[in-house]
Image (cartoon, rainbow, N blue to C red):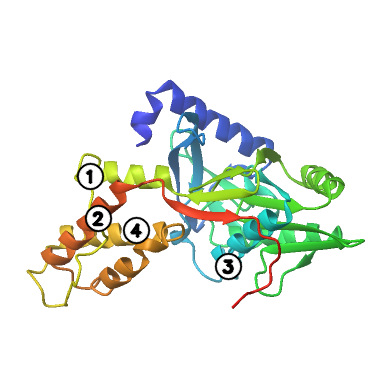
Amino acid sequence: NVTEAQNDPKWTHAMQEEIEALDTNQTWKVEEIPEAAHLVGSKWVYTIKYKPDGNIERYKARLVAKGFSQKYGIDYLETFAPVAKMKTIRVIISLAVLKGWEMCQLDVKNVFLNRDLEEEVSMCMPPGFEKPGRCCKLKKALYGIKQSSRVWFERLRLVMKKHGYKQGNGDHTLFVKRIEGKVTLLLVYVDDMIVTSDDEKEIARLKGLLSAEFDLKDLGKLKYFLGIEIARSGTTLVLNQRRYTLDLLKETGKLGCRPASTPLDAGHKLGSKDGELLCEEAKGRYQRLVGKLIYLTLTRPDITFAINVMSQFMHAPTDVHLKAVDRILCYLKKNPGKGLLYVKQRSIEIEG
């Protein structure tokens, strides 16, 4: 919480750094609270960012608005923004391996602060930085504001269009540019971007134009994206969620468990009426575990069937179902680094 964070130099530095970045970006104007004003709340979110090797990269304190306290028609209207599809990410990675293209990753700092808000939004002063009788009149789309994603994506779309990039028809977060037979692809997931191309000059140009528009950080070769580790060597590439899996095993106390040979018992016949219904606390634990395991299926198709079975009981899980989920965790202990292997082929033609 804020009180504990204020007593820790690492977090106080992170909060001060965030406030300075927001001030530099002219995110708000501090003014007296207007009469009959509808104030949106604010809070701090603390996260520790890790390097691909698991070491701590930095402590991040992010100030977010409590968007749930906004009122439709008063301080927000449209909110929709597209999100990159996992199948698009897989296709881009597969294409890059097949063609031998390099993949790089870009990150936009304070992504939602890159365009002015159209609506008037007044927010409470940040916790720990309060000023009596004062509030923040937002000028930019702060994290947490309902329309933030839409405002940011529209700004990016206009920038990409201005520089000759076209949106994909099947996935609007994919931007494509073709020049003299060469192709450059940019895929965006909120503030993370993947860029791949057979045109090194266009990649350099793209980085330059984005840096001119946004506070851009070049993360180099693609190694870690959305919790997925990417290891490339020559003509092969592996996607896995090893760290995610180990964190899940640690969280559930399964790091020292005996590995299971299969995700489910052979010949299982799980039904909705098997066992005793879980209490509300255990039910919540079951639902959270299955949700986390669903995300793991992105690189672990070997547990997909088992997770599909366990998902059927989300509304009323029993102790038998929870035991079955525990078995899946024990199966993951067998090989936490297992994932998807991409190998360069001679062609992309389908053979039957």
Q: Which residue is mark 4?
A: 293
Q: Amino acid at mark 4?
A: Leu
Residue 39 in picture, x, y percent from top left = 49, 54
Residue that numbered label 2 is attached to? 261
Q: Nearer the viewer, mark 3 or mark 4?
A: 4
Give amino acid for label 2: Ser
Residue at the (80%, 53%) spot, across then down: 198
Residue at mark 1: 254
Q: Residues within 10 Å of mark 4 (few under 14, many from 20)?
A: many
How far apart in space, not on screen, are marks 1 and 4 (Cα)? 14 Å
Circles 2 and 4, Cβ within 8 Å, touching? The answer is no
Q: Secondary structure at mark 1?
A: loop
Of helix, strand and loop, which one carries label 4? helix
Residue at the image position 86 percent from the left and 57 percent from the top: 163
Give how far apart the Cα atoms at labels 2 and 1 are.
15 Å
Q: Amino acid at mark 1?
A: Lys
Q: Earlier in the sequence, mark 3 or mark 2?
A: 3
In-image side of 49 versus 78 (left or right): left
- Tell me, yes or no, if residue 118 can be seen here: no
Between 187 and 143, the one lying in front of the other is 187
Task: Determine which of the numbered discs, if any, sits on residue 42 in the image.
Answer: none
